[in-house]
Amino acid sequence: MHLIDQILATDGLAVMFQPVVELEGETLRLHTLECLTRGPQGSNAARADVMFEYVRRKRVEPIVDRACITAALHAAAALPGTPRLSLNVHASTLGRDADFPSFLDVVTDRQGIHPSRLTIEIVEHARAWDGVTFSRALQALRTLGARIALDDVGLGHSNYGMMLDTQPEYLKIDRYFVHGAIGDLHRRAVLDSIAQLGLKLGARVVGEGVEDATDLLSLQEFGIDLAQGYLFAAPLTAAELIGSGWLQMSLPPQPQTAA
């Protein structure tokens, strides 16, 4: 069986959840859950980076994105409460799959998840798509009630042009700029500039890759109050997430340093 067939098999994908936290003074609260997919166990695609590099090389992003979202929403439907959910989607999927918004509408309805709970996190922004289809997809997703996030801000194709094209509700700063910023003037300058840009664009800023208390302090110094990383939680299965306490919004767990 080819790897793409393994990925698309009924049980080919595993879903994990990682909290994005909101800092409210001394309190941490769950803001959203990023839904992460892993490929078939025992294959190279069990590593997400390997799986999606293969997917992009084979130019099958729309097919695999649909499969990942179907699996993620099925897993999320079993969670208690109504947490917000962040779903990763390739920019090329939005630019090549004109029916993607309709697909998302059908799947969310089937799982009983209102689209207003969703943030579509746009990843891998290399321009290889139809700009008109891309723009229409964004408009349709917002009409459904979904928000838009731009991933990996500061790296690759996540540039000013993409910010103007997507007008995102969230800017996610890549961990490359976050981790170790406390003692790095250049990284701190980048954090400051993106924080100010977010304010002017009306977008909330999320710091990714927060691994220790100094990373968190760096974000707080620039007014960035959304964060994600191993300081708070590693990616969790649905069962682990339910047992972790994160879904009790009024009593969020305290962050723990990764082992």
Image (cartoon, rainbow, N blue to C red):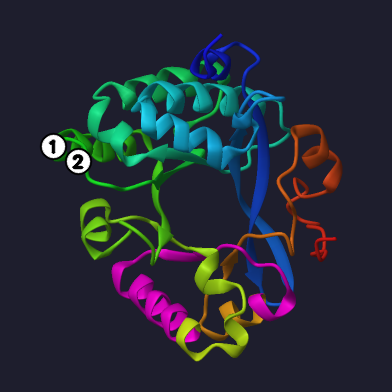
Residue at image position (39%, 45%) is 122
Determine the secondary structure under disc 2.
Answer: helix
The amino acid type found where label 2 is placed reads Ser
How far from the left and from the top, in percent, is residue 73? 57, 27
Q: Is there any visible trace of residue 140 in the rendered image?
A: no
Q: Which mark is residue 132?
A: 1
> Are the residues tagged 2 and 1 within 8 Å (C-beta)?
yes
Q: Determine which quarter of the picture holds residue 156.
A: bottom left
Q: Is residue 246 left or right of residue 180?
A: right
Residue position for label 2:
135
Q: Residues within 10 Å of mark 1 (few under 14, many from 20)?
A: few
| Amino acid residing under circle 1 | Val
Q: 181 above or below 61?
A: below
Q: Which residues are magenta?
A: 188-215
At x 50%, y 73%, the residue is 177
Alpha-carbon span between mark 2 and mark 1: 5 Å
Q: Is residue 237 above or below residue 206?
A: above
